Amino acid sequence: MARTLARLTLDHLGEFDDHVRSCLFWQLDPVSRSRIDDDQRAAELEAWVSEVLREWGSCGRVLLVDDVPVGMALYAPVRFLAGAMTMPTAPVSPDAVLLATVYVAPQHRSGGLGRMLVQGTARDLVERKIVAVEAFGDTRGTAGRDCVLPVDFLDAVGFKTQRSHATTPRMRMDLRTTRTWMSEVELAVERLLGVVRPMPKKATRLGREPGRVG
């Protein structure tokens, strides 16, 4: 079973189910969302992705199993995510990009694929010299607000609480410290994917010779 990470494209969006393609929780404020008919939501998300790709660049990672998209992460500067301003722990820090969505198809869950999507996101942002990535979490887990990531998941993949809240804390991953282990993360991901390159003998350009993953 071949697993690969790729940059999100509009073609990928069309292969996800209606739930993923219709969630505009982050892209629009509540008033604007209420004015969008259900049959227009997928087109609205595609328009949003097109705008961000044009104005900022890559805004997502897709996990493919045998070339079929089974997972996706969406992220962007908060100026593109009007829904974030309605959160009780807003605003997002000015030096951070917001991780809005991490989705893995039900039949592929519990295999670490969500972690791989976050690692791919972090790698992209590190290369673009972004300082940090933040996310709003829900302490109620999957029973919480739809389209908001469970706090337990964010904590497990390396986020720490930036601003506490009973149900919706804002969490943060500092990519300045992440730089030192990104090359190790890449190797761990490749092992999971079954595509392992030889370990470099010299320090990587991220500033450290690869060693133990931990």
Image: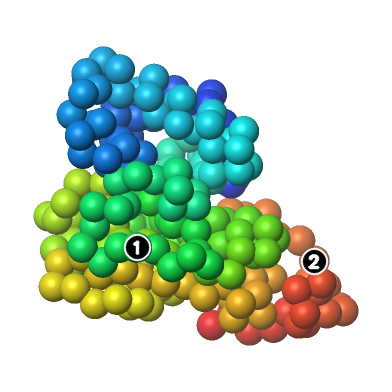
Mark-to-mark CA distance, 2 and 1:
43 Å
Whether residue 67 is visible to the viewer of this picture, yes or no, is: no
Instruction: Name which residue type carries label 1.
Output: Pro
- Left or right: 127, with 19 as reference point: right
Q: What mark, if any, has residue 111 been given in the picture?
A: none
Q: How many marks?
A: 2
Q: What mark, if any, has residue 91 been given in the picture?
A: 1
Q: Nearer the viewer, residue 208 or 88?
A: 88
Q: Which residue reaches farthest top?
A: 39
Q: Which residue is mark 2?
A: 198
Residue 170 higher or lower than 212, as above or below: above
Q: Tell me the quarter of the image containing the N terminus.
A: top right
Q: Nearer the viewer, residue 156 or 166?
A: 166
Instruction: Name which residue type carries label 2.
Output: Pro
Mark 2 against mark 1, which lies toward the viewer? 1
Q: Position of residue 82 (x, y in %)?
A: 35, 44
Q: Position of residue 151 (x, y in %)?
A: 26, 67
Question: Callout 2 environment at 10 Å: few (<14), some (14 to 19), or many (20+)?
Answer: few
Q: Give the mark nearest the N terminus, 2 or 1.
A: 1
Q: Nearer the viewer, residue 15 or 60?
A: 60
Q: Residue at x 42, y 72 (%)?
A: 172
Q: Residue at x 70, y 60 (%)?
A: 127
Question: Callout 1 environment at 10 Å: few (<14), some (14 to 19), or many (20+)?
Answer: few
Disc 1 element: loop
- Left or right: 50, with 152 as reference point: right
